Image: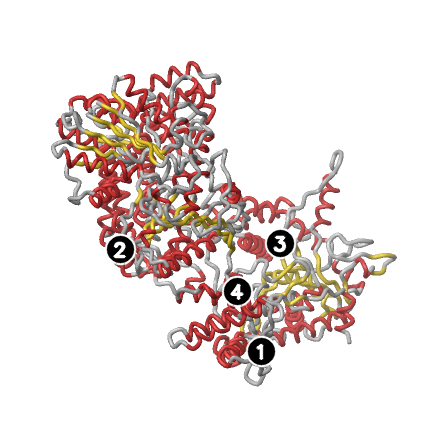
Amino acid sequence: MSLQLILGGSGSGKTRRLYDKIIQESMERPKQLFFMIVPEQFTMQTQKDIVVRHPNHGTMNIDIVSFQRLAYRVFEELAVENLRVLDDMGKSMVLRKVAGNKRKELILFQGHLNQAGFVNQLKSMLSEFYQYGISPQILREMAELAGTPLFRQKLLDFAVVFEGFQEYIAGHYITTEEVLDVLCRVLPQSEIVKNSVIALDGYTGFTPVQYRLLELCLIHARQVIVTVTADGEASVYQGSGMHSLFYMSRQMVRRCIELAEHNHVSRLPDIWLGNEAGSGKGDGKKALPRFVDSPELQWLEKSLFRYRRGCYEEEMKGGLELFSGENPSGEVTHAVKRIQALIREKGLRYRDMAVVTGDLAGYGREIAHQFEQNQIPFFMDDKKSVLDNPMVELIRGALEAVRRDLSYESVFRYLRTGLVTADQKMTDRMENYVIAMGIRGARRWSQQWDRTYREAADINLTELNEFRDQVMAPLLRMREAFGIKPVTVAGMVQAVIGLLEECCVEEKLGAYQEYFLAAGEYRLAKEYGQVYGLVTELLQRLSELLGEEQISRKEFIEILDAGFGEISVGVIPAAVDRVVVGDITRTRLAHVKVLFFVGVNDGIVPMKKDRGSLLSDQEREFFGRHSLELAPTAREDSFRQRFYLYLMMTKPSQKLVVSYAGVGGDGKSRRPSYLIGELRKMFPRLVCSEDAGGNFEEIYSVERARQQLVAGLRRFRDMPGQGKKTDSAEDGKRQHEWISVKGQNENGERVEESMNEDPSQKELLKLLELFRWFLCSEEYHEEAIRLAEAAFTSYENQGIGHAVARALYGNIISGSVTRLEQYAACAYAHFLQYGLELLERRRYELAAADMGNLFHASIDLCFQRMKEQGRDWRTISDTDRDSLVRDCVGEVTAEYGNTIMGSSSRNAYLARRVEHITQRTVWALQQQIKKGDFSPAGFEVSFSAADNLEAMKIPLSADEALHLRGRIDRLDLCEDGQQVYVKIIDYKSGSTSFDLAAIYYGLQLQLVVYMDAAVEMTERKFPGKEVIPAGILYYNISDPMVEKTGKPDEQQVKEEILRQLRMNGLINSELEAIHHLDNTIEKESDIIPVVLKDGEVQEGRSSVANRERFDRLRRFVHERVKGAGKEILDGEIGVEPYKSGQRTACDYCPYHAVCGFDKKTSGFEYRRLKGKKAEEIWEELCQ
């Protein structure tokens, strides 16, 4: 029995010395068994290294194992009962079940059990307790000593869950952490361990159970050899604070020596390597074995994180490089460039290089993208979660659909996975139908669909029903299998497997795998190839663990989700010669010559510790004060990170390239890590190179050339004074083709001659040379043209032409006045809506427009009923009026939108709200009628070109015309002898205000056009009488609030409400018309926008126009309408939305994502409407 330590700094040759020693002794004693114990992820590499170094090229009597593999070797030897080990996946599922059962006993944890990630945190803590020998009994004892009630209760909750977990698995399973406990119990009986030589390499420290195992090895094995990364010979045996770089190594040495002395195990002389060369000793001139070719790295190993260090004053020879990238993409681009250069110029292999980062999640995708683009083979040392895999989504969506009674969201989560049906077009159609018709619940999904909606007149319901039956059958069968009452877990698992088999998921995943393999997406191919087996294994494991348990659907989903969270897909390297990409803690590197360390920014290096732990650092220190060890606190971990950084940065033997980004992927600025400052202090001559995006000297592949060309074109476009600003993409293409191919500028000068010594001019010349190469290449010529067009693109309004416009709209344009207002706001939006007929998706919901429709329909029905019943608005009682409104609103809401009003509590409330506001509105409209001489003559008065009205039938050319249609909400008339006054009212559920400037610009034409039509229709009805426009008015439907102090007077409140509900619009300024509109007016009218003073109209405070102005306005609008019709048929579709103040046509436009309007793109501009006062407009109209 003996212990020997092999010590030395990183790169001193400890592992090589150990290998040689073990190989030599194994050959001298061929019957002796040698165990080489290394971390699990290092076993394959160690086997390879031993085989390569062994003279016989085999491991012979050397067994390379991890602690876990050693356990199974011993179990096999001693025929230990086959132990069923519960891995993390099973642990999460059991914990979720146990925690649910113990919910009533939990105080702090009870409300967190359903939070995402909580079970995973609970599992991590449980694993930690197992790993450090903390039992439920210890937790209860510590709870008694806890200083705060909160901490005490937390420990008690831990104990409850821990005890429940142990009870559940007792006699059936052991955890992964308990495997070594079992090994400790049986190892003394092992013959293969007795008299063997055990070597441990690659460890920076051990857990308590590993130390127990090491102690047993010291007692029973012939010799134990341990390699330790450490510095000076004297200091390693002395105590030191955790701030010391080699604190963990010293702790490791101290514990090993204590174990040997406690068990009277002899110690062989420690072997020190590189003591005079590195690890803080000597002058650093004698190189450690790893750094013979790199004096900079030798100095780095000697000085990094040491308190007493000098500076490297020698000339930098390239062993250490520092790079500052604009962003993570720039960093990776630099790494790609250097890798290609080292391959080409230094003869290195891809396997000689590695890339590491502290943020693999943030950098991994960019690294994979650029490496694939540049055909650099690589292995990403990372495990990918399967939570976003379509198969897992399919199961989760299906289970959610079963639990939520086939809700819309869950059903289409299930259908959109691509594993149920490949017919996305029919899926889209069905989704549109379901959204529009409000299909919810199993009953609606099981019924035949026989109703449609207005925008889907051409839908094929037979085809849709057949498709629905096909895709929903597997889901409905699974729902039936789940039943209503709780089912056993085994039954639920079988139902899920049945769904997978019915949907042929395994075959479809296989097809995806083949597709990804053909596309070179090997990581995705590997994922899709593994996921079916992993998920079905999880389901079988769940059935074994909880098979006969009866649980609810919700519990089953939660337990299964906990299991899905533990599944990850690992990828085996596809080739030997590849660049390893990993993180600074997990990835184990061997024989690396060049290491790229990217993302060395603050917050990444050192990494901010996001423990996700249920124990705080103070609570962990509490355990430490009572001599109980747990995982390191954040403070302790920060010191450990320095040691891991030291190990990682001293891995390469020739070159270390460190880089950081100025801006993160989120666009926010980033600071360099403190490590950058440390390196600059250690190496004063170290120069930080920067991102030179336009460096055309560093083109090493077509892909790189393409990237440089795109970046260069973008910079050239933004250069002041370079080239001319083109008005179109075609002009830009011609200009740059001419310069590139002919080598001349547009003045006929040679490009070289016109260049000055300005660096930007030289850069432009290189850009043009590069562009010429692409342009002259037969393979890349078209791509070069496209790139130039894209770089110099500029919007140009070319229209669609008269012929295409006629093909789209016909020679007769039919539509409402609203259509013309849309055209005036933005011609392109009009084209999309009426030319291409793009529609917003119809939704089964009450939107603002629906509320307006309900108000309109209810008010109209009230007026219709009054007319049918022969009632007079001036005499109907309040009770009868309110009853009438209530009946009319009830009738409208009952029939509206496929019974949408009763589909939810919210909509039922809105129905009551509609009734209340309609009551208020009809009361106000009645008061307005009673205050005037006008009587309602028409409600929802429809008119069109078919009525042969000049206002509605406008000729545009010999064979082209504009046919308008419309509907006046209410038409009121007042007969006064030979005169008939006309008033039209438009109900608005918003806050529309009459705006003469909006009429001038074509944005508010409706009331004027409607008055034209109303006048024509009235003249036909009253031949021989003079028809006079009295007013065009908006009534804004609302329920205003009135503020009153003291005891309110009901009559005063009503009068104030009526004033707030005053109509706005344009009134005929003749006093006869005004008095007919409000025969109670004295000063300011309560119902129309008119103020009188001394019997005269106050025009400054009123919205009025004399009869001439009314006629001029009608003629102006008529011409504006006619002009719009001509422009539409001429093919005008300019993307020129109006802007008036802060208001634009884009504010509520549904087509913004389609039109591509962007102020940053040349050619796109708002059509700014000049602010005009009413008097200016009247003067212009009357000229």
- Write down the residue under mark 1: 753
Q: In which quarter of the image is residue 761?
A: bottom right
Distance between the Cα atoms at labels 1 and 2? 57 Å
| Above/below status of 935 relative to 492 | below
Judge by depth and name the residue closer to the eye, 665 or 66: 66
Q: Quadrant of the C terminus?
A: bottom right
Amino acid on which disc 3 is placed: Gly
Determine which of the numbered discs, if any, sits on residue 990 in the image.
Answer: 3
- Write down the residue under mark 4: 1156
> Which of the two discs, 2 and 3, sits closer to the camera?
2
Q: Is mark 1 on a helix, strand or loop?
A: helix
Judge by depth and name the residue closer to the eye, 346 or 343: 346
Q: Badge 4: few (under 14), some or many (20 or more) residues near its Cα, within 10 Å?
A: few
Contact (Cβ within 8 Å) of mark 3 with mark 1: no
Residue ID at (75%, 36%):
1045
Amino acid on which disc 1 is placed: Glu
